Image (tube, rainbow, N blue to C red):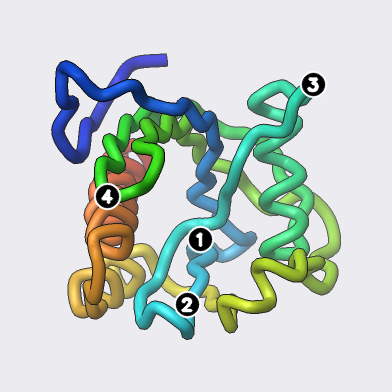
């Protein structure tokens, strides 16, 4: 998979903890995109999360999409890899995200959010991709983490739109 975006700056004398994660541009049967509104941080984001020890990228993707959207995911295409240097964390971290376009496969169920996710006051929305882009463009970016998430997911949505429309 090709690296498509790097956010933040790698500082040469900093030792980074690595976190590997997956993100999905999840499409339903009528072409809408799943978007999560993070109420505690006043921004939207794409479904996804960390890869657990022993999981493959695709296993993690399907688990995260099912937990956050209630959708069984059928992987359509790889989008690319994003790297995020999160120097504002202690210890500093590089988050490596593997991005996919997935399609809803079968009957949708209720999301199964973790207790941590419930604490973020998440709201699942299904919107046209242009509306998803508009929502993210207008989101608040109250802190460095929100800035990175919004910038990353906006880039991913634009890239996914190019792929979907070709």
Tags 3 and 1 in contact by the CB under 8 Å rule?
no
Q: Distance between the residues labelled 3 and 1?
A: 32 Å
Residue 86 drawn at (x, y percent): 30, 42
Q: Is 75 situated above or below 15?
A: below
* Pair 3/4: label in front: 4
Residue at numbered disc 4: 88
Report the front residue among 44 and 146: 146
Q: Relative to 143, say whether 87 is above or below.
A: above
In the foreground, 88 or 123? 88
Where the N terminus falls, by quadrant?
top left
- In the picture, measured across the screen, residue 118 lies left or right of residue 138, that is right
Mark 1 vs mark 4: give the one in front: 4
Q: Is label 4 or label 2 in front?
A: 4
Q: Which of marks 3 and 1 is in front?
A: 3
Q: Which mark is residue 31?
A: 1
The answer to whether residue 31 is left or right of residue 112 is left
Tell me which numbered mark, 2 or 1, is placed earlier along the sequence.
1
Gap in Å between the C-alphas at discs 2 and 1?
19 Å
Q: Dot 4, how many residues are within 10 Å of its Cα: few (below 14), some (14-19), or many (20+)?
A: few
Q: What element carries label 4?
A: loop
Q: In which quarter of the image is residue 73?
A: top right
How far is mark 3 from mark 4, CA to CA? 28 Å
- Residue on which disc 3 sits: 54
Q: Which of marks 2 and 3 is nearer the N terminus?
A: 2
Q: Name the residue under label 2.
A: 37
Q: Residue at x 57, y 33 (%)?
A: 76
């Amino acid at each position: 998979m090709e690296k498509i975006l790097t956010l933040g700056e790698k500082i040469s004398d900093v030792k980074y903890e690595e976190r590997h994660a997956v993100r999905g541009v999840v499409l339903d049967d009528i072409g809408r995109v799943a978007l999560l509104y993070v109420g505690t941080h006043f921004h939207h984001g794409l479904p996804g999360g960390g890869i657990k020890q022993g999981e493959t990228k695709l296993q993690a993707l399907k688990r995260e999409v099912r937990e956050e959207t209630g959708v069984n995911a059928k992987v359509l295409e790889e989008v690319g890899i994003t790297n995020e240097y999160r120097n504002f964390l202690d210890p500093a971290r590089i988050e490596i995200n593997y991005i996919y376009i997935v399609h809803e496969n079968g009957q949708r169920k209720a999301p199964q959010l973790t207790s941590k996710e419930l604490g973020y006051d998440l709201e699942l929305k299904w919107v046209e991709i242009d509306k998803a882009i508009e929502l993210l463009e207008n989101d608040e970016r109250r802190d460095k983490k929100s800035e990175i998430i919004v910038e990353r997911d906006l880039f991913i949505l634009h890239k996914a739109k190019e792929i979907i429309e070709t």
